Amino acid sequence: MTMDQTNLANQVRPLVERLHRDLDRLSYYQLLSVGRTASTTAIQQAFYRRAVLLHPDRHFRLDDAELKAKINTVYKRISEAYRVLSTPPLRTLYDSRLLQGQLRLQQKDDESQS
Amino acid sequence: MTSRLVLGIDLGTSNSVGAIHWEDGHWSVVSDAHDKTIQPSVLSFHPNGSVLVASAARKRRLVDPKNTIYSAKRLIGRPFSSRQVQEIIPRLSYRVTEGPAQQVMVSVRNHLLSVSQVSALILQHIEKLADKVAGQHVPQVVVTVPANFNEAQRAATRQAARLAGLDVLRIINEPTAAALAYGHGMDESKTILVYDLGGGTFDVTVLRVSRGIFEVLGTAGDTHLGGDDLDERLTEAMVEAFMQQHHYDLNMNEMAILRLRSVAEKAKCTLSDKESLAVHVRELAYGPGGISLDLEYRATRDRLEGLVADLVERTIGICDEAMTLAQLRTDAVDEIVLVGGMTRMPLVQRSVTSFFSRKPVTSINPDEVVAVGAAIQGASLLGTLPASQGHVPSLLLDVTPRTLAVATVGGFCQILIPRNAQIPTEHTRTFTTGADYQTAVTIRVCQGEHRRFEKNVMLGELRLEGLRPAPRGEVRIAVTFEIDSDGLLKVSARDQDSGEIQSAAMRVVAVDEDNDSAWGTDGQPPLVDEDILGQLPDDEGTRS
């Protein structure tokens, strides 16, 4: 592991631990740390700020497997938040679900039998 | 301490290129003893038992066509019975057969090689050249593939690199690599479109580049559209001209077709610089009484453009598709980067310029930019890429090019991960048993945009075993499909009620995972003779 990646890992550890612990209690807005009325551009910028710190590629040579797994889990959720909030129709749908207390927009679990 | 050097390899249909990223943040394109950076993706099995690679092998294409392998990339990761493979077989001068796991096997002299093994030897050749340039072993590599390669094609490419003894840090998409090389260190935020027309594949990718972040907005392409197809059109035209001159059908004469194809390729390249060219091929065939028949053909740029207009038009249609996926209008593109030797063709440049109302960038080397981008991505992963002026050291946010779906009742598809989804990503679906006390479930997985399963590329079968015996519908298994940063699919399954993890092994079609180390009868890779490299006379039998 390179010095840069060690430093980065130490820097992001508290953020990763917090997000990972609260993953199922945070809305997409909270995951990206933006307000409910944030513009698409602001959402994009917020996602980029998160990605720079938390994208798995930025921790490619990280030896701490546990932290690495957490980073991976957290990043995928942040990416999901970005996808929904940066796609206007999905964001509208999400906002209405959020009012009903649903924190994630999930595909309907279709039951396939084989 | 592990090396901090990294090698980017652009493993192309016709040619391959390597680039080294040095510790100090600079890079260089790898060249051979003759200062050539472009290495033909060709192997030739010589009668003396040695295997020639690259330029030396290319020279054998006309001398020993049956034992000279080219365009292997058109076959990699595709099942033998697929339409794409069956279509290409008549155009190959070497023999291919069906191997284990529906793989395509290449049969040359006394060797039977998988396509991954063929590609492994080409990758190894590039790596050896890099070792010489670096003065040390450079085993860490990033290999590029067309953006539209599916899971099986990526897996087979990764397997090729492993067979070559390389440590594959990442498989990345060619147009994205080109964008990384082009947009590295760029200051403003820009939307870049990469138009990549190679020997056998076409890709177009739209990205937003912002202070070191490269976000792919849309990617589209055709893995069976490239320079080879243009050569074929010109070859057909010359066959037609020969027919009119001599009333002789060259299609019956395999050797003549091979020679013409080589002539066509050269003529096509020449016509990028010149308006016309007199093609003269002597003794192409023998007529009644053994008289030699020559081809006289006046190749003009106009005529060539007429022959290939529909192919170039197809690439523009694909550009349109990528823009739609990116939800952008053509005037939102700030820069157009052309990649691949084919983009030197004036018709291509004109078509792109007219569609986007913007001239493409001319400052990059279309042959080398992909390998350089791959090396940059490798350095980024290793953390050896220096950040500059508040920039992040290049972070790539790539997407999956194809929809991933499973088969449902009636032969339809159910989408798991949609096309153009940013990776890494994961989606979970719940499956239940359909019969009482069923203990195993088979889930068929495919990639593609069709609603019907059989119209897509079948990736493989996922088998869940050891299920809790219970009445039907009672066992609910959550299956998670994850596409990792490599674009590779990982599958895991969990019994929703018991919480037990199920085994979920997916066998990928056309990749023989069990055969990772098998190199034919003796288990050894064929010996590649490097000394012969570049020492053979240029014995291509055509004079044009």
Image (spheres, rainbow, N blue to C red):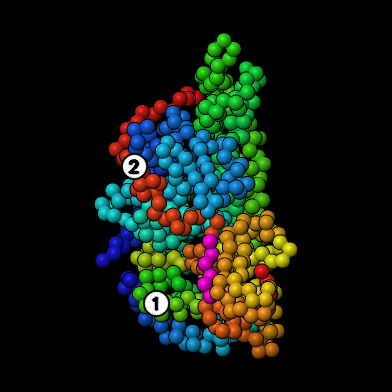
Query: Which of the pair B445/B423 is nearer the observer?
Result: B445
Badge 1 local density, few (<14 within 10 Å), some, or many (20+)? few
**Residue found at x 64% / y 65%:** B406
Q: Amino acid at mark 1?
A: Ala
- Quarter of the figure with the C terminus of chain A: bottom right
Q: Can see residue B336?
A: no
Residue B209 vs residue A111: left or right? left
Q: Quadrant of residue B301?
A: top right
Magenta highlight range = B502-507
Residue farthest along the right direction in this orientation = B410
Which percent across, then down, holds residue B454? 67, 56
Which percent across, then down, holds residue B158? 45, 57
**Residue found at x 63% / y 53%:** B319
Q: Which residue is mark 1?
A: A65
Instruction: Indicate whether B103 appears above or below A89.
Output: above
Q: Which residue is mark 2?
A: B528
Query: Which of the pair B300/A71 is nearer the observer?
Result: A71
